[in-house]
Image: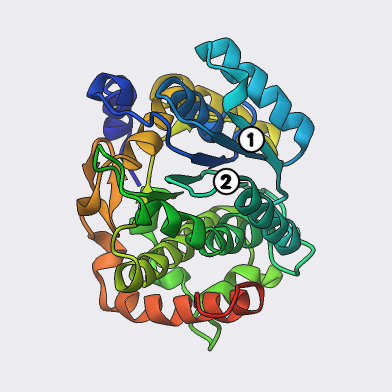
Amino acid sequence: MASIGELWHNARNPPADPQSLGLSFKDKAVLVTGAYGEGLGANAAIKYAALGANPLILGTRTAEKGELAKSAIIERTGCSPDIFIIEPVDLASFESVKRFAENVSQRVPALHVVQLAGGVSPWKYAKTPDGHEASVGINLLSSALLALLLLPKLREAAKAPSPDGFRPHLSILNSIVTFTVSEKKLPSDGQKLVQRCDDESKWDPIQQYLLVKLATWYATKGIAQIFAEHDPDIIVNATCPGLCKTNMARDVPRVFKIFMAIQNYFLARTAEMGSRTLVSATGLGPESHGKFWTNDKYHAMDGFLATERSDALYPETWSEIVSILRPHVPEGIL
């Protein structure tokens, strides 16, 4: 994890604002999950609206939250209300994710940007309706499922190249804690990684966060590989916005909230600053495919991800994810 010195520096040296870089999403169809509230997805949606996205598809848990997000974006940017498409999605449910993808596909001919920023950071063990631990089901499996289900619409955008050379991008929110996973915390008793994360008897909120982020990186890597083999004009990458002030830790015990409030006061970026990384990642181009974008640069594949254990764990975990999602994905995608 980043040292206190690095966090202090990062909080005072945020990523460049995409607007200052001349990035434009004018007339690009942009989809954002986690678009409600004051978090990273919501702030990314504000930036996409300001940078010309049209339509801007807001994936929120309810239609009511979508309308609130829409009003907040209009108030902040002055954009036209006509650019919005609001579709509710409960990322805890595969059926809801499939319905969301189907509805979006019916409403737009193509997608230029898919920004997957929805997620949870639970402090207590809970299961989704599909039988997976909450962060596994929401952060990992539903994000991967949605990416695969929206592939046809990204393909449609790739078939009609933009005059400005823009290529479709799919970006998945992650964290550089992925690189700090300890091998000692990995399954060593025949369990696979997703099985380990689903196991209530071994559940710990801190380790769960790290392991689910690791599995999410492997999912991103697997999706990027599929796209590279069959859809080289579609860009897939991952992002880390750094430590940010969001409501992700709203369920932690009071003593931890006090500690985090003090930490965030001195060491955290605002959610707006963090969202700059998410938005800029979707305008990087083909050189970013399969890369990890943070602090306006690509993070080297070092730490745990540079180990032989990781090299072996990736195909095993991706195969595990595929086996879970295959029944929910149309034939020919996986």
Q: Percent x, y for residue 142?
A: 61, 60
Seen at 72% across and 26% down, the residue is 67
State if disc 2 and disc 1 touch (CB < 8 Å): yes
- Residue 236 visible: no
**How many residues crowd around disc 2 within 10 Å: few (fewer than 14), some, or many (20 or more)?**
few
Which of the numbered marks, if any, corresponds to residue 291? none
The residue wearing badge 2 is 108
The one nearer the camera, 168 or 224, is: 168
x, y (%) of residue 285? 24, 47
Q: Is residue 332 left or right of residue 200?
A: left
| Badge 2 amino acid | Val
Pointer 1: what residue? Answer: 85
Identified at 66% across, 73% down, the residue is 328
Q: Nearer the viewer, residue 211 or 327?
A: 327
Is residue 192 among what the camera can see?
yes
Residue 6 or residue 13, whichever sits in front: 13
Q: Residue at x 47, y 69 (%)?
A: 185
